[in-house]
Image: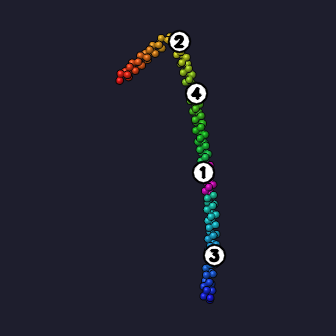
Amino acid sequence: MADIAHAAEGVRPLKSRSRKAASQLKAVARETADTARGDAEGLIDSLRDQIGALAAGIEHFAEERYDQARATAGSVADAGSIVAARAGRQTLATANAIRRDPLPVLVAVGVISLLLALFMGTMRRR
């Protein structure tokens, strides 16, 4: 029995050192976790700021493109109305010319009809 008691005396200091080491390891693990949490929070904050800046940049870019598109659409609408007005005036002038003298139109229609007939006849022979 004395041998067992003597052997247990050597284990007690080892047990005490193991508890101290475990306690220190636990403290280091907590400190590391706190540091990692702080680092992660810092990275998340930085990422949030970068995403906010990126979103603002995209919004600014989209606004510029929208303004350009609106200006271009306005220019196209203005040009379209000018072209439509010119086409209307030209159509009116042509209609007046046909009313005054329909002979040139009849000749043009006849020539086009003859050319079509010639072309269609040539196509049938092939």
For discs 1 and 3, the disc positioned in front in the rendered view:
3
Q: Earlier in the sequence, mark 4 or mark 2?
A: 4
**Residue underneath mark 3:** 19
For discs 4 and 2, the disc positioned in front in the rendered view:
2
For discs 1 and 2, the disc positioned in front in the rendered view:
2
Q: Amino acid at mark 4?
A: Asp
For disc 1, the neighbor class at 10 Å (few under 14, some 14 to 19, many from 20) is few
Q: Earlier in the sequence, mark 3 or mark 4?
A: 3
Mark number for residue 88? Answer: none
Res 32 visible: yes
Q: Residue at x 62, y 69 (%)?
A: 28
Q: Residue at x 39, y 18 (%)?
A: 118
**Residue underneath mark 4:** 78
Mark number for residue 50? Answer: 1
72 over 117 or under it: above or below: below
Magenta segment: 42-52
Q: Amino acid at mark 2?
A: Arg
For discs 3 and 4, the disc positioned in front in the rendered view:
3
Q: Position of residue 113 (x, y in %)?
A: 43, 17
